[in-house]
Image: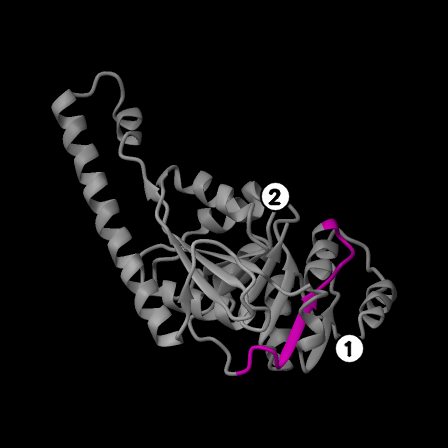
Amino acid sequence: MPLKSILVPMTAAPADRRALDLALALGRAGGAHIGALYPKRDPREAATYVGMGGDITGIGQIMAQIESEADAASTRARTTVERWRADAGLAEAARPGTAPHPTVGWRAPTGDPDQLVTQAAAGADLVVCAGLQPEPGAEQTLIEAALFGAARPVVTAPATLPRNLLASAVVAWNGSHEANRALAAMLTLLPAFGQVHLFCQPEGHRAVVDPVDALELLAWHRVKAQVLPAGTGDDVGAALLAAASSVEASFLAMGAYTHGRMRQMMFGGVTHHVLHHAKLPVLLVH
């Protein structure tokens, strides 16, 4: 089934434009509806952080500042969407429809940003976010809200999109729950790629898994994949990106946070390394 609904959480930063471009590249063939969402932070949250002993006047000033900044950021994000929509020649629509061509929608609800993204992502096939490198603007918490809160696949947009997004895909697969879900999420996309590769290097504590079942599943979907050589050393994240670079991959898919978010934040891991160093679009599935 082609992608029909793609959510793009906006951050009011220049990186938003490339996330929109990537969403269109992924959804154009299926006539997807691209929903741009700017989650405006609720100024009433300020009262919680200031505490019961805070000065009422001071709290009011803080709330007014938060609301003013949120409105300004929302306006910037909306301007980005409108300029991009005009450049791409896309029609505006409030929700997905039956049109064969992509459409664009805009929302800027107020509330907790993570919760707003979680709620919106539940109604999307896919979420596209700006990657974490190199310029500021992308927000890892929004990526994680879609991954964990809504259990949706997330694609991160790099600083420079590949000229041919469908040239070569690499799927990281080690037999884990997350890796199996990533492979399943890619089954509708992989037939369109010129080349498909599996990277099967396990992390240190995992046993080597024969990829024969994964290769057979791909074959049933008329995808002929080649297994990439495993890297050397214990840094699987670096080995994965090096392997993707060696075949000039234009797209990477992987299971995310196999060890959990807190452990990755404290000690690093494959997901952490890829999020902070990838120079190509990455699909993450938890």
- Nearest to N terminus: mark 2 or mark 1: 1
- Give whichever of 79, 224 is nearer the camera: 79
Q: Which residues are magenta?
A: 164-177
| Residue at the (54%, 55%) spot, across then down | 272
- Give whichever of 114, 52 is nearer the camera: 114
Question: Secondary structure beneath disc 1?
Answer: strand
Q: Which residue is mark 1?
A: 226
Disc number at residue 32? none
Q: What amino acid type is highlighted by mark number 1?
A: Gln
| Residue at the (75%, 52%) spot, across then down | 176
Residue 204 in the image: x percent, y percent?
72, 55
* Residue 260 makes an appearance in the image: yes
* Circle 1 residues within 10 Å: few <14, some 14–19, many ≥20: few
Looking at the image, do the residues carrying marks 2 and 1 touch, with CB atoms under 8 Å apart?
A: no
| Residue at the (52%, 48%) spot, across then down | 121
Asked if the magenta segment contains residue 169, the reply would be yes
| Residue at the (67%, 71%) spot, across then down | 170
Q: Which residue is mark 2?
A: 260
Residue 216 in the image: x percent, y percent?
86, 68
Asked if the magenta segment contains residue 111, the reply would be no
Q: Is residue 36 left or right of residue 97?
A: left
Question: Secondary structure beneath disc 2?
Answer: loop
Question: In which quarter of the view is residue 1 placed?
Answer: bottom right
Q: Is residue 43 left or right of residue 253?
A: left
Residue 150 to residue 88: above or below: above
How much space separates mark 2 and mark 1, taking CA atoms? 29 Å
- Give whichever of 133, 195 is nearer the camera: 195
Residue 99 in the image: x percent, y percent?
53, 66
Q: What amino acid type is highlighted by mark number 2?
A: Gly
- Find the residue positioned furthest to the front: 98
* Circle 2 residues within 10 Å: few <14, some 14–19, many ≥20: few
